Amino acid sequence: MDSCVSTAIARERHGAENLGLLHAGYGQRTQARERRAFEDIADFYGVRDRLVVQLDHFRAIRRVRPYRQDIAVPENEFGGPDCMAARFR
């Protein structure tokens, strides 16, 4: 949704001919759907310049993704003693 809104605002301000959109895939579970949404947004707003990159090196840290249900996200107070020392196991 934020990509769609950002594209709409940028197109209004700068015109579709002055836009380029970027899709980054990093092995996320929703990658295929996100790619389709990227193409649909670009088509809808008439953006021709598109760049698709695959960031496979992020797969090495897959286990720390906060959106995975099987991994707890550490909770620390901002600025607390453990704020910068959170460990992902």
Image (cartoon, rainbow, N blue to C red):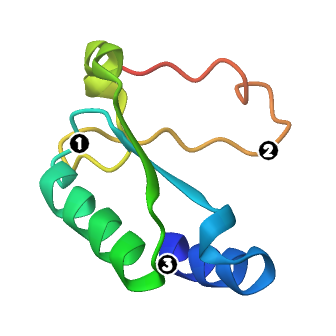
- The residue singled out by tag 1 in the image is 28
From the viewer's perspective, is 6 left or right of 73? right
In what element is the residue under mark 1?
loop
Which quarter of the figure has residue 62?
A: top left
x%, y% of residue 11?
Answer: 66, 79
Amino acid found under the numbered disc labelled 2: Phe
Mark 1–mark 3 Cα distance, whole angstroms, equals 19 Å
Which residue ends up furthest to the right in the rendered image?
79
- Tell which circle, 1 or 3, labels the residue nearer the N-terminal end: 3
x%, y% of residue 41?
Answer: 38, 76
- Relative depth, front residue between 39 and 49: 49
Residue drawn at 65 percent across, 17 percent down: 85
Amino acid found under the numbered disc labelled 1: Gln
- Tell which circle, 2 or 3, labels the residue nearer the N-terminal end: 3
- The residue singled out by tag 2 in the image is 78
- The residue singled out by tag 3 in the image is 4
